[in-house]
Image (spheres, grey):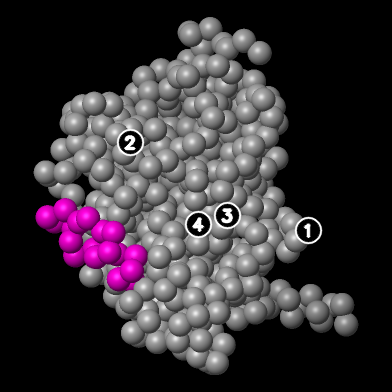
Amino acid sequence: MAPPPSSAHDSSITLDVNGDKHTLTVDHRTTLLDALRERLDLTGTKKGCDQGQCGACTVLLDGRRTVACLQLAVAAEGRAVTTVEGLAEGGQLHPVQQAFLDLDGYQCGYCTPGQICSAVAVIEEHAAGWPSAVTDDVRPEAGPPPLTDDEIRERMSGNLCRCSAYVSIVQAVSRAAAAARAESAGTTAAGAGEAA
Amino acid sequence: MKEFGYQRASDVSGALALLGADAGARFLGGGTNLVDLMKAGVERPSRLVDVRGLPLDRIEPTADGGLRIGATVTNSDLAAHPGVRSRYPALAQAVLAGASGQLRNMATVGGNLLQRTRCGYFTDVSRPCNKRVPGSGCPAVEGEHRNHAILGASAHCVAVHPSDMAVALTAFDAVVSYRTGDGPGELPLADLYLPVDGTPHRETALPQGALITAVTLPPAPVAALSRYRKVRERASYAFAIGSVAAALDVRDGVIREARLAFGAVASRPWRARAAERTLTGAPAGGETFAAAADAELAAARPLPHNAYKVTLMRNLVVAVLTGLTEEAAR
């Protein structure tokens, strides 16, 4: 197959963002972060370091947290992008958003969208049984680790907060995770009841 | 950033054909290192061939009881895999010790092995660097080298390989599979990285245009009792200043088999074979562990500002092996 002509430095792509399809032509150098903010006007996702070190640009890509600053927009075609704007449903804040509000999980708020997107994924990763670097015994036979504050701090370490609101961020993630577990247990119990 | 072409491959032969003979083209995996280096102007590819969607994202048992890990398996999926966690726990721990949850979701196994050093002179295009511009010099030797190599370096380059994953893979005798236009090939991971000598810009023994397709772990019962421990300047989300992957088989107080590899001390993950020889057949205990560390570190040639790593690695080896021995006794 012959390489493309040297002028082929942009592509027409369709991005799936929060369930909406957007067709746009992007220079291949465009990151997903810049495409979201500058082209789609979705400015909830923040640019911090632009080097993958701070987590302010965290979004969910096919449900998994990702730093949008190191993700080329052209390479995100065909994958489902969820930004902080896509978390609320029917005018109802996502439980993680509500927990950050209730517990003051921020000060200036700049890192908050990234923290929230990351926390949504952390809760799912933990529920799926993923160990972390502070899990002493990673063997599956040891069972899933309880989501202690140490576990939350480690799992959230890709999101920096220059205001250092970490104490209340940990509380917010902990509360939202507990609520998710309770809801999941309730659903399971209800399901079991119906089946019986 | 320089402009570049972009193409997406759907199968391995298609990826190899797209890369073709263009020396300026690069495979794009998770992009966590490559895109960053492109922003810094260190990498200036003419084209990217996106291989992230290749059907190489499975972890499968091999016929002899090992595991074959596809090259596009993400770090997250590798660390979460029950077979990895149960039979090679130090590998899961090493992966989890690296980067952040976001980056582990993006990064791939093949890309992890081929990531570049984080030496500040390599990533700063305004400075000389023999790895980036052959023959331009190495300012680290006389300059900032607190986190540079103590083993296997040369006067031309003292950079360290940054991977955690590769340290555990090295301890477990992983074999790298690749494909070129001429067909498939294999390299033990221990032979993937070339000695530094006078050619730090030549980093791997892979043929030009090769695509890593898988990493195979041979069966290693000893790995069931294994540990990865990483020392860094903050508690999480930082590169190692020293790390150890270790596995021990201890019976009746005697070491029957030992595996040991060091990270962040050399241009490649460092298999500590001299230490392993000292350990094998010796009584499990502090004196043996210290002697093993000393046997390996006798070859260390620290620079003025990184001699601390020799002590750090010695203490780390003793601590990790002591912990494994206690675990074996439980």
| Same chain? Circles 1 and 2 | yes
Q: Is residue A55 left or right of residue A6?
A: left
Left or right of B8, for residue A102: left
Disc 2, SS? loop
Between A159 and B305, the residue placed more toward the observer is B305
Answer few, some or many: residues within 10 Å of disc 3's Cα (few below 14, many 20 plus, some between 14 and 19). many
Rendering coords of residue B184 (x, y %): 68, 34
Marks 3 and 4: CB-CB under 8 Å? yes
What residue span does the magenta drawing correspond to? B293-310
Position of residue B231 measured from the top left corner of the image (x, y, whole percent): 31, 66
Residue located beneath label 3 in the image: B174
Disc 1: host chain:
B
Q: Secondary structure at mark 4?
A: helix
First in sequence: mark 1 vs mark 2? 1
Residue A91 is tagged as none
Residue at the disc numbered 4: B170
Q: CA distance from mark 3 to mark 4?
A: 6 Å
What chain does badge 2 belong to?
A: B
